[in-house]
């Protein structure tokens, strides 16, 4: 029994392997050699381990576990110099109703699996529904034909309580574990097709969000659009400010397509829309994930320089046709340029 536990510890990949290893090695000596132990192997909080033996030699293990709906049986060999040729599994609520021979058709209410391998197979896994099984006590028996390192075919069995009147060597028992409560919230990777609206021209721009949600349980995660907020007010930014900057968003649904206004205050540092989704996993754990769409601040210095260049070109044309007369021409041109710049900014931004 110590050997099978050590092999299981070596196979563990998770961070708690060291702690579990210490616990198992300390606890193995408290496991009784009674009939209950013989029937159930080494029992852990989320699975049981049964020795897979050929004669009296341990060559692998049968790991039995469960999720909410299924019994999961994984049988594996320890040495890559060996391989499975045949594999037979019977599962039920009553050992007396097992098939007489491995590979026989099971009786009603019992489950059986038979597999024949042509490639180098070191392990096999089966998932059987609890629909017709008693979660309080399920009985199993495993038989495999193994090709050993010398190329010889040997019979292997899951060590358990001997069976009489049957070609199965023995059986073992399993009691369904009820998984510990899932308290880990779901996660998601989120992105948006237009993270920056470069032209603040007051127009509505279609936005599409991509969100990939996942959960440790592997089950589906519900995604809902929770909110879209702006760091600037919806209205009151100037004469030409347009209200209703967020449109066609269906909050409380998995909506990922809506419209945002390309607008920002001329007096601000730029607008930021924050788009937030709520995630809910099958256990009811929730979390939020957000992304942003930005409208850059207006660079007034750069804008005024560009508008001044436009006004100068216009003034040159107007001066050619005598628009400014002959008195105080330079002063009139400067006034025209200043008025042009101010009117353009006001017409576009309302300031």
Image (cartoon, helix red, strand yellow):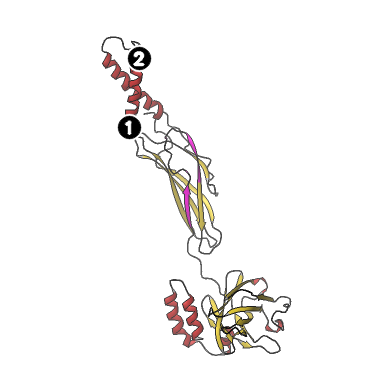
Magenta span: 180-208
Picture disc at residue 302: 1
Q: Which residue ends up furthest to the front in the rendered image? A: 150
Q: Position of residue 293 (x, y in %)?
A: 43, 43
Residue 187, visible in the rendered structure: yes
Q: Nearer the viewer, residue 179 or 22?
A: 22
Q: Horizontally, is 135 left or right of 165 in the view?
A: left
The answer to which quarter of the image holds residue 156 is bottom right
- Estimate the x, y position of residue 339 in percent, counting from the top left: 33, 21
Q: Which residue bears the numbered disc 2?
A: 318
Query: What is the CA distance from the residue labelled 1 to the residue labelled 2?
Result: 25 Å
Q: Main secondary structure of the magenta part?
A: loop
| Residue at 61% in and 73% down | 119
Seen from the viewer's position, the closer of residues 214 and 185 is 214
Which secondary structure, mark 1? helix
Q: Secondary structure at mark 2?
A: helix
Measured from the top left, where is residue 170 in percent x and y? Answer: 64, 86
Going 65% across and 78% down the picture, which residue do you hit? Answer: 86
Q: Nearer the viewer, residue 45 or 106?
A: 106
Which quadrant would the C terminus be assigned to in this image? top left
> How many C-alpha atoms fall within 10 Å of the one at disc 1: few (<14), some, or many (≥20)?
few
Residue 339 seen in the figure? no
Q: Position of residue 42 (x, y in %)?
A: 53, 83
Q: In the image shown, does 303 or 19 lie closer to the viewer?
A: 303
């Amino acid at each position: 029994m110590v050997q099978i536990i050590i092999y299981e510890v070596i196979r563990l990949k998770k961070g708690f392997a060291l702690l579990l290893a210490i616990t198992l090695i300390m606890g193995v000596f408290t496991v009784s050699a009674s009939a209950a132990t013989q029937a159930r192997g080494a029992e852990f909080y989320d699975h049981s381990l049964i020795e897979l033996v050929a004669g009296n030699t341990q060559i692998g293990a049968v790991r039995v576990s469960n999720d909410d709906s299924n019994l999961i049986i994984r049988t594996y060999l320890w040495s890559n110099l060996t391989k499975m040729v045949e594999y037979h599994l019977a599962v039920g609520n009553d050992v007396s109703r097992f098939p007489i021979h491995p590979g026989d058709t099971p009786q009603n209410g019992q489950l059986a699996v038979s597999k024949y391998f042509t490639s180098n197979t070191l392990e096999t896994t089966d998932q059987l529904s609890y629909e017709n099984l008693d979660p309080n006590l399920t009985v199993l028996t495993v038989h495999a034909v193994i090709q050993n390192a010398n190329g010889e075919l040997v019979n292997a069995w899951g060590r358990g309580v001997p069976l009489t009147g049957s070609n199965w060597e023995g059986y073992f028992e399993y009691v369904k574990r009820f998984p510990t409560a899932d308290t880990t919230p779901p996660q998601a990777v989120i992105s948006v097709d237009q993270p920056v609206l470069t032209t603040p021209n007051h127009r509505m721009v279609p936005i599409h969000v991509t969100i990939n949600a996942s959960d440790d349980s592997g089950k589906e995660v519900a995604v809902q659009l929770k909110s879209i907020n702006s760091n600037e007010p919806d209205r009151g930014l100037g004469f030409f400010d347009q209200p209703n900057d967020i449109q066609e968003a269906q909050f409380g649904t998995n909506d990922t397509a809506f419209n945002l206004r390309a607008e920002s205050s001329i007096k601000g540092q730029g607008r930021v829309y924050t788009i937030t989704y709520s995630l809910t996993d099958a256990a009811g754990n929730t979390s939020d994930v957000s992304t942003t769409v930005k409208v850059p601040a207006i660079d007034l210095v750069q804008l005024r320089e560009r508008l001044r260049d436009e006004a100068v070109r216009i003034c040159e044309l107007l001066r050619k046709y005598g628009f400014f007369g002959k008195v105080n021409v330079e002063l009139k041109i400067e006034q025209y340029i200043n008025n042009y710049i101010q009117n353009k900014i006001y017409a576009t931004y309302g300031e």
